[in-house]
Amino acid sequence: MTVVTRFAPSPTGFLHIGGARTALFNWLYAKHHGGRFRLRIEDTDRARSTDEAMDAIIAGLRWLGLDWDGDVVSQFSRAAHHTEAAERLLADGKAYRCYCTPEELAEMREHAKKSGRSMLYDGRWRDRDPAEAPPGVDPVIRFTAPREGETVIRDHVQGEVRVASDQLDDMVLLRADGTATYMLAVVVDDHDMGITHVIRGDDHLTNAFRQTQLYHALGWEPPAFAHIPLIHGSDGAKLSKRHGALAVEAYREMGYLPEALCNYLLRLGWSHGDDEIIGIEQAIRWFDLDGVGRAPARFDLAKLSNLNGHYLRLADDERLTRLILPRLAETLDGKLAEDAPSRIEKGMPGLKERAKTVTELTENAMFYARKRPQPLTEKAARVLDGEARRRLGRLRRSLAAIGRWNAEAVEATTRGLAQEEQIALGKIAQPLRAALSGATVSPGIFDVMVVLGKEETLGRLDDVVDRA
């Protein structure tokens, strides 16, 4: 059997973190077993579905590297198949037309509530003659659900789960306007697409019982189910925006790398021993459903940031330069120094050691990108007092005499001045850092001088030295 999984989001909102994890688990399971991963957009809710949301979902999956097999399937385009299945159930006596008005249903639920009984639909049209139908009421089509026994699901995560038949009512298959409900559409689409494994959040577990009944009624083999626990916030509460329940695009804008986000999502509810850093190829080799736990995972933005810092340090310098240049250009209104791209790429090894996100990396690289004169932070300005500026003037003259500009030469020259003036190296190195970076924190200052080059270094010193 070829494993076929799917991700089936509704285009009523963007791709959020929980959906991204569901997509990742389905993608990894298919890849691990040499199978196929399909993408279906469940766009039957025409009033709430938008092209913008669909485009964002697709863009988010592509950014994460979760490619799919075949074309994207639109659930709405398959409406005729859903209707055909419902009509077949009608013909087989496994569904019926219900002529209840909305007012009758409301009254039925209210009466049941007052009587302390179940508010499930009571099946009042299950055995009635359609000839008794009131005029002017368009019927819905309801499933004739089993009333005896129980439905059993052997879930790959939850284990064996059972529900008594009297806990499930005769659900609506087709609405009065002829459109299919979610329950019917999902079953028909999963069957027609050859889906073998349905991996989704455990909030769908109750749906699985109803869908299993439909599979059996239609004479089809149900897929294997795996209902994964939902993601909670770091405090154990339901995940919300304050915890990080944001669209995937937001994490991209916040400066997270897709490989870091995938690694983090993988570890939300799945484990492989004590391994934390798991690249995508390793994840494909290791991933299986027996590693998924039953307890809700807790989302921790600080852990994601730390993991992202690890992946930043591993990332190619040219790639990181391409990522931050547009951000720098936007911040500086396009006024980048002519040598900014080459400087940043050359200085990237030192820059990325101090950053956890692309956003931080952009901020750290700002002093390489700006044109002269370099603005000073408040702390940097305090460091550059009169005596510091005079020392930098003397250092500038010594640096100008260097023939071969490299880290060894500039460090030796700086240390030589410190020894000559009988001061600690920091007394000259910290003002030097302030003058060249505009701040009191930067990569190693001698490496910075090499990245800037002799002409730019001397020019930045000229901007701050006291010529008196």
Image: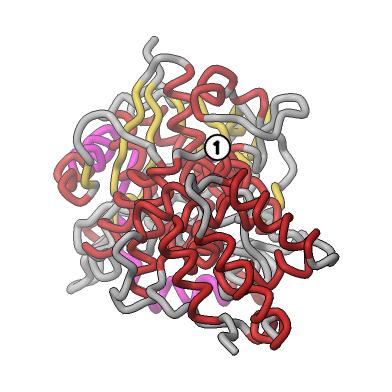
Would you identify the image quadrant in which residue 80 lies?
top left
Residue 39, percent from left and from top = 31, 39
| Extreme residue in the top direction | 1
Q: Residues within 10 Å of mark 1 (few under 14, many from 20)?
A: few
The residue labelled by disc 1 is 314
In this orientation, does residue 115 appear? no
Q: In this view, does 337 lie above or below 86?
A: below
Identify the residue shown where x is 63% and y is 62%: 442
Closer to the camera in the image, 277 or 106: 277
Quadrant in which the N terminus is drawn: top left
Q: Is the magenta stretch mostly helix, strand or loop?
A: helix
Number of disc labels? 1
Would you identify the image quadrant in which residue 140 lies?
bottom left
Quadrant in which the C terminus is drawn: bottom right
The reply, left or right, for residue 313 in relation to residue 23 is right
The reply, left or right, for residue 244 in relation to residue 142 is right
Closer to the camera in the image, 219 or 268: 268
Would you identify the image quadrant in which residue 437 lies?
bottom right
Q: Which amino acid does label 1 sit on?
A: Leu
Residue 434, percent from left and from top = 63, 73
The reply, left or right, for residue 267 in relation to residue 1 is right
Q: In this view, does 422 lie above or below 32?
A: below
The reply, left or right, for residue 256 in relation to residue 202 is left
Closer to the camera in the image, 338 or 384: 384
Residue 28 drawn in magenta: no
What's the magenta region? 84-110
Identify the residue shown where x is 72% and y is 38%: 294
In this orientation, does residue 441 appear? yes
